[in-house]
C-alpha cells in the first residue's frame, strides 16, 4: 500500500523519522475541522489527480496505449457551520500520457460525446457556488449562453460545489470520525514529508491512513450519497477507496489523498474498470473572505452543458458509469 500512496503524490524523503502516535499526544482532526467550520474560515486549495478508463485504451503504431487523463483544480473553499458552504474554483483537464490525446480526438471525431466533453475541458473552466447556488463558465456551457452572460446557473449545489474530483468530504465530522476510527497506520512524522505545489517543505505532521469500501462511504457520507445519486450496486460497492490524511500539530488538514479502483478481487465486471486518485492540498487559511456569486446580469439558467454534451466533468460520473461511452 505504501507504494500505491507514494505513487499518488506523497513524496516521503529518506530522512523522515516515523514515531508511533501516542494517544495522549495525538492531534484531533475532528475537533480541528469543527473549529474551522465555527470560525467560517476559507481555505485556499490546489487539487490534482488522474483517472484511468479501462475501456478506451488501444493500439497505436503496434503499441498498446492505456487511456487516462489528469486534472487540476485550484481556488477557495468557504466553510460554515454545516461544512463546506461555498467555493470558487478553476479546473482544467490534461492528457499527459503518450497517445491519449490522439485517442480522445479519434473518439470525438467518431461522435463520442464523452470524448468531446473531455476535450472541451482542456481549456480552463470556472465554478462558483455561493448561497447554495452553483454556477459554471467555460467551453462546455458558453455556446448555449446569451451574449454577455458567460455564467451558467446550474441549480442547487452539493456541499458547496467542492466535491466531484475529490469524492471524500473530510469536512463532514461524522465522515471524518468514521475514517479515523478504522485506520491501518497512525504516525507522527518529524522530518520533511513533502513539498507542496507552492514549493514549501512540510514537516512535523500527523499521518493517518486507512481504507473503506464505496458501500461504507455511501452509508456514512451525505456528500457521497448525493454524488453517487443511487446506492452503489454490486459491480463496485465492495471495491476499495484508500485514503491518506496529513495534518499539522493542531489537527488542521494539510493534505488529503484518495485512491480508488472500481475493480475488486473475485469480481469480473461487465462494465469497464476505472481507477483514479485525487490529492487535495490545503495551502492557506483565511477569515473574512466569503465567496460571492456572479452578478445576476452575467448569468443565465443552463443546467446542462451545451450541444447535448454530458456533464462529464467530475470523477463521480466516471465511477457511476464506469466506461464513459455514449
Image (tube, grey):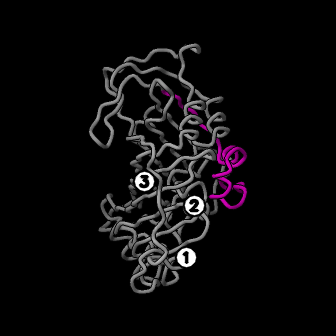
Alpha carbon separation for disc pair 1 and 3: 24 Å
Instruction: State left or right for residue 63 relative to residue 225.
Output: left
Q: Which image quadrant for residue 231?
A: bottom right
| Element assignment for label 1 | loop
Alpha carbon separation for disc pair 1 and 2: 20 Å
Q: Earlier in the sequence, mark 1 or mark 3?
A: 3
Q: Earlier in the sequence, mark 2 or mark 3?
A: 3
Instruction: State left or right for residue 8 relative to residue 168.
Output: left
Residue at mark 2: 131
Residue at left offset 58%, top offset 27%: 184
User: Magenta span has 212?
Assistant: yes
Query: Could you tell me residue 261's position as x and y percent?
Result: 55, 49
Residue at left offset 44%, top offset 27%: 248
| Residue neighbourhood size for the residue with mark 1, other residues' Cα within 10 Å, grouped as few (<14), some (14–19), many (≥20) | some
Furthest residue toward left: 199
Residue at mark 3: 50
Query: Could you tell me residue 75's position as x and y percent?
Result: 40, 53
Residue at mark 1: 304
Q: Which image quadrant for residue 17?
A: top left
Query: Could you tell me residue 46's position as x and y percent?
Result: 39, 48
Query: Could you tell me residue 216's position as x and y percent?
Result: 69, 43
Give the extent of the magenta segment: 207-236
Q: Nearer the viewer, residue 113 or 41?
A: 41
Check the picture and name the quadrant holding the C terminus. Answer: bottom right
Q: Nearer the viewer, residue 135 or 205?
A: 135
Can residue 266 be seen by looking at this rendering? no
Can residue 204 be seen by looking at this rendering? yes
Instruction: State left or right for residue 149 relative to residue 102.
Output: right
Mark 2 vs mark 3: give the one in front.
2
Q: Where is 61 relative to 14, above or below?
A: below
User: Magenta span has 126?
Assistant: no
Residue at left offset 42%, top offset 53%: 50
Amino acid at each position: 500500500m505504501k507504494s500505491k500512496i507514494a505513487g499518488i503524490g506523497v513524496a516521503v524523503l529518506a530522512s523522515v523519522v516515523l514515531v508511533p502516535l501516542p494517544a495522549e499526544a495525538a492531534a484531533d482532526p475532528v475537533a480541528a475541522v469543527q473549529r474551522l467550520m465555527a470560525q467560517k474560515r476559507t481555505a485556499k486549495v490546489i487539487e490534482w489527480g488522474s483517472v484511468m478508463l479501462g475501456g478506451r485504451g488501444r493500439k497505436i503504431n503496434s503499441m498498446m496505449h492505456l487511456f487516462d487523463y489528469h486534472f487540476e483544480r485550484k481556488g477557495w473553499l468557504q466553510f460554515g457551520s454545516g461544512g463546506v458552504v461555498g467555493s470558487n474554483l478553476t479546473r482544467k483537464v490534461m492528457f499527459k500520457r503518450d497517445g491519449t490525446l490522439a485517442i480522445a480526438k479519434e473518439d470525438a471525431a467518431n461522435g463520442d460525446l464523452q470524448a468531446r466533453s473531455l476535450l472541451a475541458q482542456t481549456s480552463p473552466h470556472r465554478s462558483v457556488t455561493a448561497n447554495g447556488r452553483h454556477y459554471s463558465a467555460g467551453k462546455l456551457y458558453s455556446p448555449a449562453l446569451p451574449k454577455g452572460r458567460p455564467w451558467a446557473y446550474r441549480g442547487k449545489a452539493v456541499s458547496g460545489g467542492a466535491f466531484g474530483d475529490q469524492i471524500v468530504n473530510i469536512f463532514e465530522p461524522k465522515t471524518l470520525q468514521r475514517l479515523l476510527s478504522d485506520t491501518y497506520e497512525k504516525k507522527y512524522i518529524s522530518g520533511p514529508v513533502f513539498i507542496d505545489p507552492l514549493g514549501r517543505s512540510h514537516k512535523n505532521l500527523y499521518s493517518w491512513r486507512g481504507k473503506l469500501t464505496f458501500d461504507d462511504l455511501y452509508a456514512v457520507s451525505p456528500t457521497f450519497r448525493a454524488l453517487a445519486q443511487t446506492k452503489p450496486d454490486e459491480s463496485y460497492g465492495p471495491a476499495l477507496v484508500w485514503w491518506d490524511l496529513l495534518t499539522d500539530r493542531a489537527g488542521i488538514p494539510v493534505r488529503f489523498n484518495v485512491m480508488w479502483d472500481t475493480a475488486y478481487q473475485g469480481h469480473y465486471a461487465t462494465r469497464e474498470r476505472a481507477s483514479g486518485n485525487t490529492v487535495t492540498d490545503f495551502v492557506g487559511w483565511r477569515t473574512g473572505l466569503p465567496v460571492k456569486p456572479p452578478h445576476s446580469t452575467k448569468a443565465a439558467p443552463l443546467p446542462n452543458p451545451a450541444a447535448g454534451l454530458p456533464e462529464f466533468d467530475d470523477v463521480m460520473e466516471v465511477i457511476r458509469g464506469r466506461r464513459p461511452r455514449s
